[in-house]
Amino acid sequence: MEFSTKAGTPDRIKSGCVVVGVYADGKLSPAASLVDAAANGALTSAAKRDDLPVKRGAILMMTGVAGLATERVLVVGLGKRDELKTKGLAEATRAAVKALDASGAGSALFTLAEASIAGMSAADNVRTVILAAREALFRSDELKSQKEDAGSLTKIVFPVEKLEAPAIAASIAMATALANGCELTKRLGNLPPNICTPTYLADTAKQIAKDWDLKAEILDRKQMETLRMGSFLAVTKSSAQPPKLIVLTYSGGKSKEAPVVLVGKGITFDTGGISLKPGDSMDEMKYDMCGAGSVLGTLRAVAEMGLKINVVGVIPTCENMPGGDAARPGDVVTSMSGQTIEILNTDAEGRLILCDALTYSERFKPAAVIDIATLTGACVIALGHVNSGLFTQDDELATELLAASKTAGDAAWRMPIEDDYQEALKSNFADMANIGGRPGGSITAACFLSRYTKAYRWAHLDIAGTAWKSGANKGATGRPVPLLTAFLEARAA
Ligand code: BES
Ligand code: MN
Ligand code: ZN
């Protein structure tokens, strides 16, 4: 899909279809009024017949309309004007784009992004429209021998006034970069675990480095042994797939500027290990690498945006498999930090690979470290599938991340993490246990990680409930790439 601008009014620019909005009370958007006037009141007549879509996301495709540079007009319901927010505009856009794609129109002149709609600027609306359009057209059919129908739509054009054209063009470039990042994250998440292995993630990092001029360094098992990553190595022990520690460096900022480090959980399949998971929807544990996927997607987005900031992605990636050589409940391992861990449940493996990656991250003398992980089922119980869980003792960092979450429309909720919860991790035989029992399970998991993050400012995002959707529309969401990218954009500014 190509997005561009064209100077002119929506009635005069040639395209396969002009897309206009109408509110629930029948009031036309400014662009719709203009189109209506040029088309001899075609929309007003349709309104008289009660044909205009009232509900948000409902559509009316009119063909053979005279007086315009195109014969197709797609009228899209925007719902109630005072209730139309960014989310509503995205909803209307998805409906419009799906209808366009099925219509035969190759290009569309899209007016739903005009200023004042949803109470936002045209540049903000263009971003919303692009992300929603890309989402509506996203398909996961690369492994189907019969591809889903390609659809007709290849071009969306935003009509602009000459003066605003550069700002809109910049907004298109930024939104496209973000959509590309989100799509990479979704694609990696959706790929099956026999294809998306630790090696595949490492190769993807190398490819990003090559395409966007980053530096990729891939550490193998030997190097992890040298670093004494005893915790990470315990998880990967009985997997036939070799583990990787991916370090992907983007240097968009000044050479001496401390980087933001993003650490992503990359369990390409989580069986639970010897503490085997029940069989129900175990396939969804292919999504246990979505933290890693979001780090790769964010770095791709940030690089394409050319943000003036330094970012390092650190991805510990392996499988969690049972087997004759697997870690046992009761094993005590020594992490890279020197702290010992009693593994009471091999299914609490995310924290075991993350703790060594967090210790490793000290070497970058980071401005801040954010880890992103599908860490706990308990977080899904606490927050459902709406908010990602944000854990940090650092109030300023929390404020920054929550602001980015708002800007991006990528919800996150701050969870408690005070020291009183640490008690649950007490072990009789090691410095700590790797589980804290069922109460506050997402908090004690965060507490475990906090023991490895004393050297820098740190926040943890538990995305177990938000990284993918189950059910009929099963698929990765690309979250929290929008949040992370907005956070880095704000820091770069
Ligand atoms: N990857 C899972 C967490 C998870 C479970 C995410 C379900 C999304 C949906 C993680 O490795 C895990 O198994 N966590 C355990 C921890 C427990 C053993 C303390 C969990 O949440 O049950
Ligand atoms: Mn697990
Ligand atoms: Zn896991």
Image (cartoon, grey):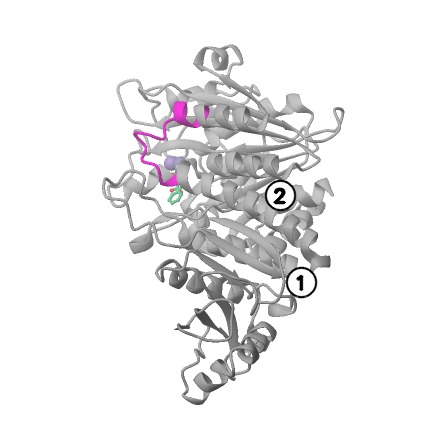
In the structure shown, which secondary structural element does the residue marked by tag 2 occupy? loop
User: Is 384 included in the stretch rendered in magenta?
Assistant: no
Say the numbered circle drawn on residue 335. none
Q: Is residue 131 left or right of residue 402?
A: left
Viewer-closest of 375 and 439? 375
Q: Is residue 220 left or right of residue 309?
A: left
- Residue 70 seen in this snapshot: yes
* Mark 2 CB lies closer than 8 A to ligand 1: no
Query: Pointers 1 and 2 in contact (CB under 8 A)?
Result: no
Q: Amino acid at mark 2?
A: Thr
Q: Residue at x 53, y 54 (%)?
A: 130
Q: For mark 1, what is the residue? A: 121
Q: For mark 2, what is the residue? A: 392
Q: CA distance from mark 1 to mark 2?
A: 33 Å
In the structure shown, which secondary structural element does the residue marked by tag 1 occupy? loop
* Image: magenta residue range: 189-202
Where is residue 282? Give x, y as percent.
28, 41
| Image quarter for ligand 1 | top left
User: Is 197 included in the stretch rendered in magenta?
Assistant: yes
- Residue 428 seen in this snapshot: no
Viewer-closest of 436 and 407? 407
Q: Residues within 10 Å of mark 1 (few under 14, many from 20)?
A: some
Q: Amino acid at mark 1?
A: Ser
Q: Quadrant of the C terminus?
A: top right
Where is residue 93? Give x, y as percent.
48, 62
Where is residue 279? Give x, y as percent.
24, 41
